Amino acid sequence: MFAPGVDYSLETVPGETSTRRVEFVRDSRGVCFTVHVLNDALLWVAVKGVRGSIEVQAWLSAFSFPPSQLEAFDKKWEQRLREIFQE
């Protein structure tokens, strides 16, 4: 389980691992991380069931980071989430 203030490594895309810190957790709502490789951007992720389906929401708040790298991050995450949840 995630705990605030704890660093961990996550493989987001095959072969790509990054270190993140849990900032806060909202039970049954989601979790917010600091993503170190994105200049400590904040990433909020929520997964919930809605009327027999699964809804995944992710928000990224990044500052002073090249837009091209953020767009690449967005594309990788969107593709990976679609694979996981088979949209």
Image (tube, helix red, strand yellow):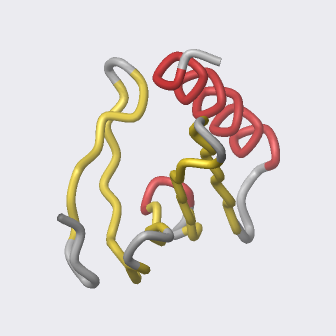
Count of marks, rendered view: 0
Near-viewer residue (26 or 3): 26
Percent position (x, y) of residue 8? 21, 59
Percent position (x, y) of residue 84? 46, 23
Q: Quadrant of residue 11?
A: top left
Percent position (x, y) of residue 86? 56, 16
Give the residue furthest to the front.
Answer: 51
Q: Decide: is 77 above or below 26.
A: above
Could you tell me which quadrant the C terminus lies in?
top right
Q: Decide: is 34 above or below 12.
A: below
- Left or right? Give the position of 79 relative to 35: right
Residue at left 69%, top 38%? 74
Near-viewer residue (64 or 12): 12
Residue at left 40%, top 83%? 24
- Left or right? Give the position of 25 relative to 68: left
- Left or right? Give the position of 30 relative to 16: right
Give the residue furthest to the right.
Answer: 67
Could you tell me which quadrant the N terminus lies in?
bottom left
Percent position (x, y) of residue 85? 52, 25
Residue at left 69%, top 32%? 72
Near-viewer residue (58 or 33): 58
Q: Decide: is 61 above or below 84.
A: below
Near-viewer residue (65 or 13): 13
Q: Quadrant of residue 10?
A: top left
- Left or right? Give the position of 22 relative to 33: left
Residue at left 60%, top 22%? 82
Q: Decide: is 27 above or below 82.
A: below
Q: Quadrant of residue 53?
A: top right
